[in-house]
Amino acid sequence: MIIAIDGPAASGKGTLARRLAAHFGLRHLDTGLTYRAVAAALLAQGLPLGDEAIAVEIARRLDLSHMDRALLSAHETGEAASRIAVLPALREELVRLQRAFAKAPPGAVLDGRDIGTVVCPDAGVKLYVTAAPEARAKRRTAEMLSQGKEADFASVLEDLKRRDERDQSRTVAPLRQAADAHLLDTTEMDIETAFRAAVDIVTAARAS
Ligand code: CDP
Ligand code: CDP
């Protein structure tokens, strides 16, 4: 059983993926972390974000267990991750790692941008989670403030829109809804309502 979840930043896909995995007894991989880990390593060593060979080398030696959570979740790391995510050879390397994770028993929930389209096109269930940019910026701002980080709504909104644009317009594995993905628009939903809707979609798909 593989559940593929895609969507833009702060749509709620990570929270849903984690909770669905717990609910259905599956493993969970936030594939954004793999891009963030490579980005964090490049930033920490002062290496260029556009050098594909260096990025691939770092991806080959990736060890998520040694990564600092705060560094991985930093706003700058997300921004750098979306910059290096345009490099085809880097994506190839990370997709290899993500597929290996997905295929190991008893199955998994993966969330990202290209899970239903590229990483796991044969997934048993695909969800495309989205929400209006303003709703997503509001959530991301609240999340940052609750973690004691500085955040103002207008600049968070601007950053989200810029990242969406970059993720949707790149030529390799752009963010888009797979033809067979269920659309879950959470603009008017709190996370509990969204979770129940997601469970219903997965349960129905498993029964058919
Ligand atoms: O993984 P992604 O960036 O798509 O989003 P997330 O990290 O799951 O969610 C971002 C923030 O929005 C978290 O603090 C969630 O609890 C919150 N959220 C919400 O308030 N309502 C939703 N329907 C979905 C997420
Ligand atoms: O949590 P949030 O949605 O802010 O970002 P993330 O999921 O951690 O992803 C960071 C960046 O990595 C995204 O903006 C994408 O450019 C890239 N990414 C990707 O290209 N493909 C994936 N499967 C996951 C992330």
Image: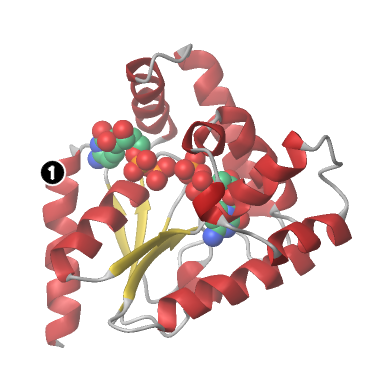
Q: Residue at x 50, y 79 (%)?
A: 100
Could you say whether the residue bearing mark 1 is in a helix, strand or loop? Answer: helix
Which x, y percent locates residue 51?
88, 52
Q: Residue at x 69, y 71 (%)?
A: 93
Which x, y percent locates residue 20?
21, 61
Mark 1, residue position: 192
Find the residue positioned furthest to the front. Answer: 66
Q: From what the image shows, is residue 103 above or below residue 51? A: below
Which x, y percent locates residue 109?
33, 67
Which x, y percent locates residue 103?
42, 83
Residue 20 visible: yes
Ligand 1 within 8 Å of disc 1? The answer is no
Q: Report crowding for label 1: few under 14, some 14 to 19, many 20 or more residues within 10 A (C-alpha).
A: few
Return the residue nearer the eye: 180 or 116: 116
Task: Please give the count of numbered marks on the rendered protein.
Answer: 1
Q: Quadrant of residue 64?
A: bottom right
Name the side, left or right, on which 190 lies relative to 72. Answer: left
Residue 125 visible: no
